Amino acid sequence: MLNKFMRSLAILVITALLCHHAFAASAPEGTAWINSHGYSNCVLLYNTSARVILEPNCGGRVIEYSLNGKNSLYIDHEQDGWTYTPGGKRIGPCAGRFDIGPEKTA
């Protein structure tokens, strides 16, 4: 089920990126191109109570999923703006995972 969700999310992000030039002049209501968490060209989807930010620069992930101003995804601000560089520092990108927990560790 998670793989199906991730494929759908990837298709959404790719479609949004392909449509960037069409939306740049006039973004549809409830959408915007923004800079967020140190990244440019993020897609903002919003209404009166919810915001979703899709970030295409580091894996095509969701970096904000908030309701009434409270982001439900974990964000490590030390990772803001990070992108892969061959031979450079590697990270386990935060957010975008939509884990359901708590996990059982024992």
Image (tube, helix red, strand yellow):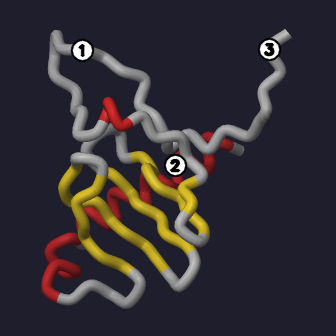
Left or right for 24, reference 5 = left
- Lower sequence index among marks 2 and 1: 2
Q: Nearer the viewer, residue 25 or 81?
A: 81
Q: CA distance from mark 2 to mark 1?
A: 27 Å
Q: Dot 3 lies on which element? A: loop
At a point 57% along the width and 60% down the height, the residue shown is 70
| Mark 2 or 1, closer to the camera | 1
Above or below, 85 relative to 72: above
Left or right for 84, reference 8 = left
| Mark 2 or 3, closer to the camera | 3
User: How many numbered marks have been drawn onto this rendered protein structure?
Assistant: 3
Q: Amino acid at mark 1?
A: Lys
Q: Dot 2 lies on which element? A: helix
Classed neighbour count for the residue bearing mark 2: other residues with Cα under 10 Å, few (<14), some (14–19), many (≥20): few
Write down the quadrant of residue 97 in the picture.
top right
Q: Which residue is mark 2?
A: 7
Q: Amino acid at mark 3?
A: Thr
- Residue 48, how many percent across, how many down? 53, 85
Write down the quadrant of residue 28 in the picture.
bottom left
Left or right for 40, reference 71 = left
Classed neighbour count for the residue bearing mark 3: other residues with Cα under 10 Å, few (<14), some (14–19), many (≥20): few
Q: Nearer the viewer, residue 79 or 44?
A: 79
Quarter of the image that includes the C terminus: top right
Q: Dot 1 lies on which element? A: loop
Q: Which label number is shown at residue 105? A: 3
Q: Which label number is shown at residue 89? A: 1
Q: Amino acid at mark 2?
A: Arg
- Residue 99, how many percent across, how many down? 66, 38
Q: Which label number is shown at residue 80? A: none
Quarter of the image that includes the N terminus: top right
